[in-house]
Amino acid sequence: MTDPAKHQRMANAIRALAMDAVQKANSGHPGLPMGAADIATVLFTRFLKFDPTEPYWPDRDRFVLSAGHGSMLLYSLLHLLGVEEMTIEELQNFRQLGSKTPGHPENFHTAGVETTTGPLGQGLGNAVGMALAERLLAAEFGDDIVDHRTYVIASDGDLMEGISHEAISIAGHLRLSKLIVLFDDNGISIDGPLALAESGDQVARFEAAGWEATRIDGHDPEAIAAAIEAAHGNDRPTMIACKTTIGHGAPTKAGTASSHGSPLGDEEIAGAREALGWEYPPFEVPSDIRDSWRITGLKASQLRKDWAKRLASIDAEQRAEFDRRIRGDLPANFDEAIVAYKKTLAAERPKVATRKSSEMALDVINAVVPETIGGSADLTGSNNTRSQGLTAVNADDFSGRYIHWGVREHGMASAMNGMALHRGVIPYGGTFLVFSDYARPAIRLAALMGNRVIFVMTHDSIGLGEDGPTHQPVEQLAALRAMPNLLVFRPADAVETAECWQLALERRTSPSIIALTRQGLPTVRTEFEEDNLCARGAYELSPTDDDAKVSLFATGSEVEIALAAKVLIEQAGHAARVVSVPSFELFAEQSEDYQAEVIGSAPVKVAIEAAVRQGWDRFIGNRGLFIGMDGFGASAPYKALYEKFGITAEAAAEAALDRLSVLA
């Protein structure tokens, strides 16, 4: 049992730093750090395995502040524990340009931050992925090397967001017993009392999803400690509803919405200092309290050193494999396997849907990259994401490499972010491209954080046919291409699909979307080429011997149409060329000279894609011709749809020839 007075002073250090930093910035959320300070103090001083001198050692416990608006709680902890870069000056620069203390936690910016949170519910989804990755790696490398917990502080808002339903359902189904959610149950939202919008029973809700759940006093350190200790013995995930007072200690604003998202004000802070018995000036922590926090960090440092000894004692080959996976390096024979597979494709020239091409590529990839973890949002047979030999993960056996996510696109995407952040695994998951809208918030955070996650998005156009406009993506490609640091691939055949998979896996700092067809496509790359041509983003697939009068640009299933249009244009006596454009983003990374060469100087430029035009003007200019969609699709066999919407070789050729006649 910790001395109650000592605990109170350690928690009050968090409260004081939080309210001082928010006040100085004149911006921020003081209420949650002040209300949850007791929870955090018990967790970090008695339970959390975290070494401030090595904040990313592999077997640390993960702490996720899903309620990212309360970021000063986390920054105060990192400072008090002794993370080197989290100086008092950084706390004083809270929310200022270039500081290590942005408004919401950013894992790519601040040491000790596990994930970027702020959009509510995302941290909870990430934590499910982290807990899942821990179990997957433990099943392979053993509990001596991988044995840690994932803790979450979540707010009312986190649990109101729809993603929370998907996340807790997944975790309960898989019985992720090392996941512990500490619910900051303060009953207040920005608009006022939570009762304005919420009357559900969160404990009952979690229990119904297969969790252990309990209620405690969130300001009673012994009750907090007892609940966490009990959670360690549970055979399923645990939610602890910690009843707290938002803005605890503030004389007039505690327990009210006015302490949620605004500075308390000088007078209120003075009153809080008096109420808490905190007699120190802003940003000052007495040496005895600072020492108590630093000793906590030193204890965890010894745990890390003990783990390092265990790691050093295992088989050298297994240790090297573990280290490789944590670093994120791909196996040495990966490139060789892809090149050999491309030789096979050039010889066999399969005519298959690119979703099938993706499955074929995964048969090769998953055999040589053991850290890939596949899955689908209840569309395995449609997404073709389960390659040969992959067994499914279940609550009793985490040795598999395939996850049935259920109809939970958002939860899947968010959990995959957590898996990638955990390190040691490379997650990929499938759904239909149109349902990328369900997963978009998590995809955006993947791009912001630079996570290597791969989204397999099949049924990528009106080519899916009879399911109709509800399922036919039209604007999704353009919308996804608009997102910074997201690679969007749309391969034209089995060769390009293999190359796009290679690029997605090699790209450590970006998520990728691979958009794939339902309908069969011929092999358009018929000659073996060792180099990965898709790495250039766009390349001349079918050149002309003469000066081209028409340049045809296309992606995916429309490359076949462009090649057929080229034949028709040349039959009419005009030279034409075809450029395949599997990735706008990679093309933008090429030199200006290369881009100019690929775009060319043909007087007529035509883009063909069964989607909206947005984004194509970089290739064809605003006077270029576009063969594609300008509205929603329809329900019919796919060939009839291509005819109806004029996405045909004949239409493309006619448009090009008409333009040439005008220019003549």
Image: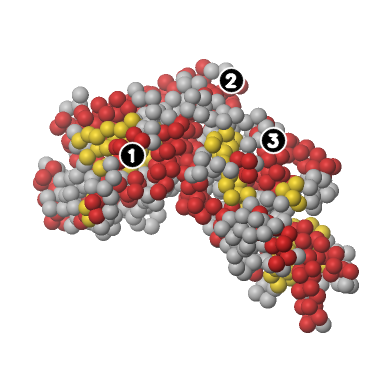
**Residue 378's x, y, as percent?**
55, 42
Q: Name which of mark 2 and mark 1 comes first in the sequence.
A: 1
Give the residue at mark 2.
316
Q: Position of residue 263 (x, y in %)?
A: 23, 56
Q: Position of residue 253 (x, y in %)?
A: 16, 53
Task: Looking at the image, tell me whether mark 1 or mark 3 is earlier in sequence order.
Answer: 1
Q: Residue at x 35, y 25 (%)?
A: 234
- Which mark lies nearer to you, 3 or 2? 3
Q: Residue at x 24, y 34 (%)?
A: 215
Are there few (<14), some (14-19), or many (20+) residues within 10 Å of tag 1? some
Residue at which label 3 appears: 363
N-term-proximal mark, 3 vs 2: 2
For the residue marked with disc 1, what is the amino acid?
A: Arg
Under tag 3, what secondary structure? helix
Label pair 3/2, CB-CB below 8 angstroms: no
Quadrant into which the N terminus falls: top left
Q: Quadrant of residue 184?
A: top left
* 60 on left or right of 357: left
Mark 3 nearby-residue class (10 Å; few <14, some 14–19, many ≥20) = some
Residue at image mark 1: 205
* Relative side of 261 to 482, left or right: left
Q: Amino acid at mark 2?
A: Ala
